[in-house]
């Protein structure tokens, strides 16, 4: 994915909510945390659980299958059994459109 794609408008994704979209055959979960938008691949690196189904605690999403946690801001694992970070995508807001861009490179 090289270009940004509009996935929703800001009034469709309120603070604390998430939505899942399919872009280029990947499922991506987008979160609104205090007005900031974050996008991660919606697949747990432990065993493929759908992360968007999990509980959001602060900036961490809890995989509903076995309890791994990931920081949605940068994708890093904060609790096992997952050991590998989850991919993160660029986000931006243009006007009132939330857009998802390329996969972020690791810092
Ligand atoms: S599939 Fe997510 S913790 Fe196992």
Image: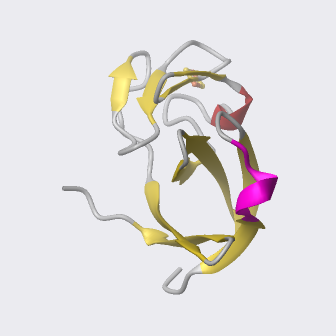
Q: Is residue 50 left or right of residue 56?
A: right
Q: Is residue 44 visible?
A: yes
Of 47 and 98, nearer the camera is: 98
Tell me where the magenta segment starts and ends, as one range: 9-14
Which x, y percent locates residue 12?
81, 55
Ligand 1 found in image quarter: top right
**Residue at the image point whose x is 64% and y is 79% from the top:** 5
Quarter residue 44 falls in: top right
Q: Image height check: is 6 above or below 79?
A: below
Judge from the rendering whether residue 11 lies leftward or rightward of residue 95; answer left or right. right
Magenta stretch contains residue 11: yes
The answer to which image quadrant residue 73 occupies is top left
**Can residue 24 be spotted in the picture?**
no
Q: Position of residue 87 (x, y in %)?
A: 44, 52
Residue drawn at (47%, 22%), measured in percent from left and top? 69
Instruction: Between residue 81 and residue 39, name the one nearer to us.
Output: 39
Eyeballing the image, is 27 above or below 62?
A: below
- Of all residues, the one furthest to the left in this rendering is 107
């Amino acid at each position: 994915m090289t270009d940004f794609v509009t996935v929703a408008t800001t009034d469709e994704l309120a603070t604390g909510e998430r939505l899942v979209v399919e872009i280029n055959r990947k499922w991506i979960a987008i979160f609104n945390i205090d007005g900031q938008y974050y996008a991660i691949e919606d697949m747990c690196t432990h065993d493929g659980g759908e992360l968007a189904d999990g509980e959001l605690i602060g900036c961490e999403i809890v995989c509903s299958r076995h309890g791994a946690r990931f920081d949605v801001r940068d994708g890093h694992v904060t609790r096992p059994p997952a050991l590998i970070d989850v991919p993160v995508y660029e986000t931006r807001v243009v006007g009132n459109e939330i857009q998802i861009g390329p996969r972020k490179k690791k810092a």
